[in-house]
C-alpha cells in the first residue's frame, strides 16, 4: 500500500511536469513507464486484497486501476493523432487494448459481491468513466470539445477586427453562433 501511494504521488508530480513541458521531453516516456509501474502495484494490491479477504483493499485497488488506465489513455492522447496509416492502426490497437482493460475493471466493480463497498465505489467509477470517454475520443482523433469562453471571445475579436465583421452575432436554428462577414458578404459560423 505504501509503495503504491508513493508511486501515485510521484506520478501526479510527473504528469504536472509533463503538462508544463512537451512530449519530446523525457517526461513523456517517464510518465508512461511510471503509469505501467503503478498499474503493476495496483494489481498486486488488488490480488493481496482478494487472497487475504480484505474487500476494502481489493475495491480501492480496483478504483486505483481504473484511474491509472484512464491516465494511460490520456498519456497516449498527448501525442498528436498520427497521419500515417500504419501509425494510426498501431494507435487504435493500443487504445483498444486500454479500453478493454478499463472495461474489465469497470465490470469488476459493477459485479462486486461486496455490496456496500460496490455501492461506495460505483460513483467513483462512473466519474472515472466520464474522463475515460473523453480521453478515448482524443486518443482516437475524435475530439470535438466545445470552445471555451476565452476561445469564443478571441474568435469574436478576430472576426470583428481582422475580417471587419459587423460585431453582430446571431443564433442559427441549429444553435450555432453566426456573424456577418462584411468583407466577403459571407457568414462566419462559430
Image (cartoon, grey):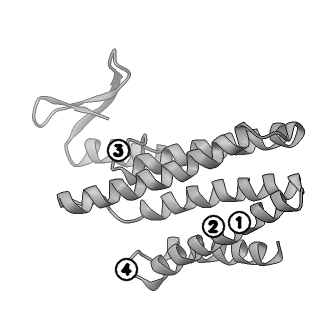
Residue 39's disc number:
2
Mark 4 crowd level (few <14, some 14–19, many ≥20, 10 Å Cα) = few
Mark 1 crowd level (few <14, some 14–19, many ≥20, 10 Å Cα) = many
Question: Is 9 located above or below residue 115 in the figure?
Answer: below
Residue 127 position by quadrant: top right
Separation of residues labelled 2 and 3 (CA atoms): 26 Å
Of mark 1 and mark 4, the one earlier in the sequence is 4
Q: Which of marks 1 and 3 is in front?
A: 1
Residue 131's disc number:
none
Q: Where is residue 21 in the image (x, y as percent from the top left)?
A: 47, 77
- Give the quadrant of the N terminus: bottom right
User: What residue is drawn where x is 87% and y is 52%?
Assistant: 55
Residue 142's disc number:
3
Q: 149 or 84: nearer the eye?
A: 84
Q: Position of residue 77 (x, y in %)?
A: 42, 59
Of mark 3 and mark 4, the one earlier in the sequence is 4
Q: Is residue 131 visible?
A: no
Q: Is residue 133 left or right of residue 43?
A: left
> What residue does disc 4 label?
24
Residue 42's disc number:
1
Amino acid at each position: 500500500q505504501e509503495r503504491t501511494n508513493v508511486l501515485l504521488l510521484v506520478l501526479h508530480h510527473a504528469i504536472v511536469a509533463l503538462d508544463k513541458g512537451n512530449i519530446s521531453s523525457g517526461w513523456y516516456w517517464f510518465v508512461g513507464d511510471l503509469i505501467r509501474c503503478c498499474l503493476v502495484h495496483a494489481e498486486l494490491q488488488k490480488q493481496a486484497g482478494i487472497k487475504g479477504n480484505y474487500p476494502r483493499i481489493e475495491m480501492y485497488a480496483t478504483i486505483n486501476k481504473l484511474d491509472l488506465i484512464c491516465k494511460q489513455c490520456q498519456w497516449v492522447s498527448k501525442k498528436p493523432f498520427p497521419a500515417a496509416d500504419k501509425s494510426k492502426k498501431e494507435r487504435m490497437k493500443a487504445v483498444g487494448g486500454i479500453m478493454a482493460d478499463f472495461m474489465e475493471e469497470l465490470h469488476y466493480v459493477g459485479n462486486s459481491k461486496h455490496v456496500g463497498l460496490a455501492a461506495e465505489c460505483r460513483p467513483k467509477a462512473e466519474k472515472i468513466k466520464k474522463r475515460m470517454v473523453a480521453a478515448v475520443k482524443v486518443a482516437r482523433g475524435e475530439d470535438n470539445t466545445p470552445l471555451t469562453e476565452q476561445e469564443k471571445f478571441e474568435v469574436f475579436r478576430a472576426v470583428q477586427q481582422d475580417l471587419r465583421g459587423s460585431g453582430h452575432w446571431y443564433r442559427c436554428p441549429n444553435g450555432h453562433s453566426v456573424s456577418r462577414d462584411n468583407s466577403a458578404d459571407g457568414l462566419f459560423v462559430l
